């Protein structure tokens, strides 16, 4: 592992930390304090963490979506791995709990860097 890689990992960790802080506030405001997935064997309050709508790589270039209420649900230690193993279930749960995916950029600058949509 070289220094550049370490830096990149450090940066992602920092982004994640900041996102978690923001999410904590959002969820507290909404009064969501227990697992939302409620799959069988749900432990409600145990090992709660945020489960994201997409895989982590999806957020690399959209870090502000990491702390979006629409992109996350609060899940327990039982439900988290279950959702992770089941893409379809993840989609169903998110649609149930959050509705359609909102794809709004909450950031200030709306400038598009590396615009790859040069399709014809
Ligand atoms: Zn649960």
Image: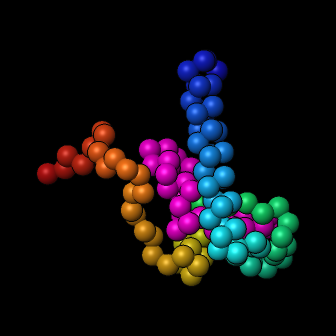
Q: Residue 106, percent across and down?
A: 42, 57
In which quadrant of the rendered view does residue 101 lie?
Answer: bottom left
The reply to whether residue 92 is in sight is: no
Q: Residue 18, percent across and down?
A: 62, 46
Would residue 64 be counted in the magenta stretch?
A: yes
Instruction: Decide which of 110, 80 is in the foreground and name it.
Output: 110
Residue found at x 62% / y 55%? 22
Residue found at x 54% / y 76%? 98
Would residue 19 be counted in the magenta stretch?
A: no
The reply to whether residue 70 is in sight is: yes
Task: Give the quadrant of the N terminus.
Answer: top right
Residue found at x 59% / y 38%? 12
In which quadrant of the rendered view does residue 15 lie?
Answer: top right
**How is this picture coloured?**
rainbow
Please count the marks in the image: 0
Residue found at x 49% / y 44%? 60
Q: Residue 26, percent across and down?
A: 62, 65
Instruction: Decide which of 29, 62 is in the foreground and name it.
Output: 29
Magenta span of residues = 54-82
Left or right of 3? Residue 108 is left
Q: Is residue 67 above or below residue 33?
A: above
Q: Is residue 107 above or below residue 84?
A: above
In which quadrant of the rendered view does residue 55 lie?
Answer: bottom right
Q: Residue 46, percent across and down?
A: 85, 66
């Amino acid at each position: 592992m070289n220094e550049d890689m370490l830096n990149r990992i450090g940066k992602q960790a920092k982004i994640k930390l900041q996102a978690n802080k923001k999410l904590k506030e959002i969820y507290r405001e909404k009064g969501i304090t227990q697992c939302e997935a409620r799959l069988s064997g749900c432990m409600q309050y145990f090992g709660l963490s945020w489960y994201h709508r997409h895989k982590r790589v999806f957020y690399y270039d959209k870090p502000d979506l990491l702390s979006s209420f629409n992109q996350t649900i609060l899940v327990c230690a039982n439900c988290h791995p279950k959702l992770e193993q089941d893409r379809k279930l993840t989609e169903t749960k998110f649609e149930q709990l959050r509705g359609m995916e909102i794809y709004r950029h909450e950031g200030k600058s709306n400038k598009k860097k590396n615009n790859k949509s040069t399709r014809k």
